[in-house]
């Protein structure tokens, strides 16, 4: 019997079984991996499906509790569209009810030298000529007085005068790759294209500006407290161009496409969109000194403002559209920027007022441009950057045929209702 005893060790059994066991274990691991890989998207789909169901449920509950109009106003605050209001989203309502606005966090993002020069800007405005509106007057086409309340009450700038640090205007300086005469660049780039479409209409309060948007927002806020630096439709943003240069200074022209929201709850949104904001700034190459600043809505056309307002409680509600003429909207520097702190030759701080109490008068050197473009050419380059289709010249009939004859080219005729550029300009 002893000879029949299998004296093979456990290790030897394991060695003999290794090939088949290894294959089995390998197949099991492969199947497990495939199952896990297949399960991940399925689990993700289930989570997304559950979230969508909950969102639809919350939407129905919101509609039942608030009604269509109430849900519309709620949605205008719910910027992330999760049907919950965070403290940040509720902040506009809190400010309106309490009358106290906390200091904006983004002010810390504005770079400035507290001991540097300061610049005072004055805002001037003449309200829209209501008689220039082509169709939308009280009682006509169902236009109600409440729809135009924000427009009718906007008679003057929100902030007639304001002082800035010169260094804040550093945002207008060109990037290192755009230092040649006539170069254009985006200060606030457009985020819209054929894939992103346009921004929603049912909003009252602009998003918190960031980076270079901060100064643009501060400038436009001198006209109205609710400027949207980025307009709903393309083109949007801010583009600039070097018009002239000297050893120490730039003359930079710029163009802004922004808009204002004139109505507030409970009235439906009313969008006021100037054809464009144009302007120029003459500043030192280190932004320590500003010689001139001018920003304005061009008024050389018969119509220069587009207006749109909703008549319902959703993004798909009926919208009224009209155009009109704004005689004046401009910001202008009271004079060159001046030091906020003055030192004498020994380095001692002195009073900014002379012996008679009058402010010290500063004498500025004359700027001699070493190279420059005409204002018209610089503006054209901004226009082409905003509207790439303008790389092709658009000419009146008489000029088009003579040019075609001279260049031996065909004429492409386009018939339009309104303008392709500047919306209403």
Image (cartoon, rainbow, N blue to C red):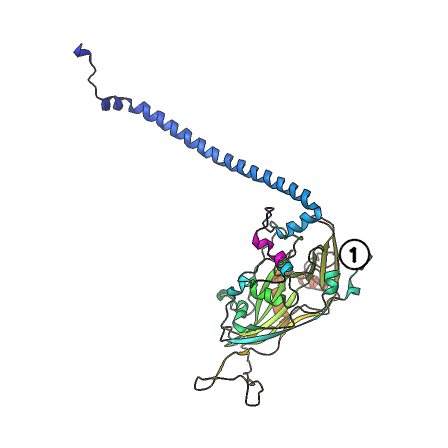
Residue 216 spot, x, y in % from top left: 59, 65
Residue at the outermost right position: 139
- Foreground residue among 234 and 51: 51
Lateral position of residue 150 relative to residue 99, left or right: right
What span is in magenta?
82-94
- Foreground residue among 326 and 301: 326
Q: Quadrant of the C terminus?
A: bottom right
Identify which residue is drawn at 59% across, 39% down: 54
Q: Is residue 332 visible?
A: yes
Q: Is residue 391 visible?
A: no
Secondary structure found at label 1: loop
Residue 301 spot, x, y in % from top left: 73, 67
Residue at the outermost top position: 1
In this rendering, the count of numbered labels is: 1
Residue 262 spot, x, y in % from top left: 69, 60
Residue at the outermost bottom position: 355
Check disc 1 and report the residue beneath it. 144
Residue 22 quadrant = top left
User: Dot 1: within a 10 Å radius of its alpha carbon, few (fewer than 14), some, or many (20 or more) residues?
Assistant: some
Residue 219 spot, x, y in % from top left: 61, 68
Lateral position of residue 402 relative to residue 16, left or right: right
The answer to whether residue 55 is magenta is no
The answer to whether residue 88 is magenta is yes
């Amino acid at each position: 019997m002893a000879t029949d005893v299998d004296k093979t060790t456990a290790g030897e059994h394991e060695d003999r079984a290794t090939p088949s066991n290894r294959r089995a274990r390998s197949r099991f691991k492969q199947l497990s991996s495939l199952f896990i890989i297949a399960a991940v998207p399925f689990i993700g789909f289930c989570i997304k499906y559950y979230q969508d169901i909950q969102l639809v449920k919350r939407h129905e509950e919101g509609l039942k509790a608030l009604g269509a109009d109430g849900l519309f106003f709620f949605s205008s605050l719910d910027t992330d569209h999760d049907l919950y209001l965070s403290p940040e989203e509720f902040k506009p309502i809190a400010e309106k009810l309490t009358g106290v606005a906390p200091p904006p966090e983004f002010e810390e993002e504005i770079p400035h030298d507290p001991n540097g020069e300061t610049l005072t800007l004055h805002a001037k405005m003449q309200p829209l000529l209501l008689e220039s509106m082509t169709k939308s007057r009280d009682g006509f086409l169902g236009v109600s007085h409440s729809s135009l309340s924000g427009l009718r009450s906007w008679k003057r700038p929100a902030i007639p005068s304001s002082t800035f640090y010169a260094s804040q205007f550093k945002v207008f300086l060109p990037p290192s790759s755009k230092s040649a005469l006539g170069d254009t660049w985006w200060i606030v780039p457009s985020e819209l294209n054929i894939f992103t479409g346009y921004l929603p209409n049912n909003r009252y309060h602009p998003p918190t500006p960031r980076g270079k948007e901060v100064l643009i927002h501060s400038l436009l806020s001198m006209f109205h407290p609710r400027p949207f630096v980025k307009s709903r439709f393309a083109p949007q943003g801010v583009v600039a161009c070097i018009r002239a240069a000297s050893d120490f200074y730039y003359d930079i022209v710029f163009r802004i496409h922004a808009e204002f929201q004139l109505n507030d709850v409970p009235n439906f949104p009313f969008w006021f969109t100037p054809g464009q904001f144009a302007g120029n700034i003459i500043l030192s190459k280190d932004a320590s000194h500003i010689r001139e600043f001018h920003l304005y809505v061009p008024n050389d056309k018969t119509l220069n403002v587009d207006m749109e307002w909703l008549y319902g409680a959703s993004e798909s509600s009926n919208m009224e559209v009209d155009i009109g003429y704004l005689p004046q909207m401009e910001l202008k520097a009271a004079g060159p920027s001046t030091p906020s702190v003055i030192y004498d030759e020994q380095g001692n701080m002195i009073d900014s007022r002379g012996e008679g109490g009058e402010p010290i008068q500063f004498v500025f050197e004359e700027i001699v441009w070493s190279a420059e473009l005409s204002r018209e050419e610089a503006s054209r380059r901004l226009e082409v950057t905003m509207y790439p289709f303008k790389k092709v010249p658009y000419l009146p009939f008489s000029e088009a045929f003579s040019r075609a004859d001279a260049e031996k080219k065909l004429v492409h005729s386009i018939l339009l209702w309104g303008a392709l550029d500047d919306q209403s300009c």
